[in-house]
Amino acid sequence: AAMLFVGDCTHGNVGGGFLYTNKESISLGLVATISTAMDASNPYPAYQMLEDFKNHPAVAPIIRGAKLVEHSGHMVPEGGYGMVPKYVFD
């Protein structure tokens, strides 16, 4: 199953959250812009958004008793249509 979240999980900042149930694991995470994650004046730093998301009423019962076995972070370029490469033909 897949659950997608927007708004509350990032405290209104641009981004969202996801929860995927795999065969033997659960993938849980947040998506946020670099500007949101790095903004020192943001009252909700990324680690706080993740902790609050894990306590969300729709998420907490699913991950109750779970053990963290892996974590990662990814930077995804955000360039829209301008990021699509041009086709080259012979």
Image (cartoon, rainbow, N blue to C red):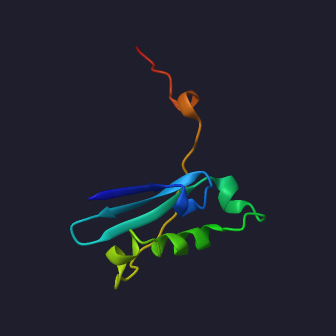
List the single residue furthest toward the top: 90
Q: Nearer the viewer, residue 70 or 43?
A: 43
Residue at 57%, 60% (x, y): give it: 10
Q: Would residue 4 appear left or right of 25 to someone viewing this image?
A: right
Residue extending furthest toward the left: 23
* Residue at the image position 46 percent from the left and 73 percent from the top: 54
73, above or below 24, in the image = above
Q: Residue at x 54, y 60 (%)?
A: 8
The answer to which quarter of the image holds residue 41 is bottom right
At which x and y percent is residue 56? Answer: 46, 71
Residue 42 % position (x, y) = 73, 63
Query: Where's residue 24, x and y in %?
Result: 23, 72
Count of labels in the image = 0
State whether residue 16 is above or below residue 64: above
In this picture, residue 81 sits left or right of residue 20: right
Closest to the observer, 47 or 73: 47
* Near-viewer residue (11 or 80): 11
User: In screen coordinates, is 62 left or right of 72?
Assistant: left
* 51 in relation to 84, above or below: below
Name the quadrant of the C terminus.
Answer: top left
In the rendered image, the residue lying farthest to the right is 41
**Residue 22: image x %, image y %?**
26, 65
39 and 56: which one is in front?
56
Image quadrant where one finds the N terminus = bottom left
Residue sitting at the far bottom = 65
Q: Residue at x 54, y 28 (%)?
A: 81
Q: On the picture, is 32 further left or further right than 45?
A: left
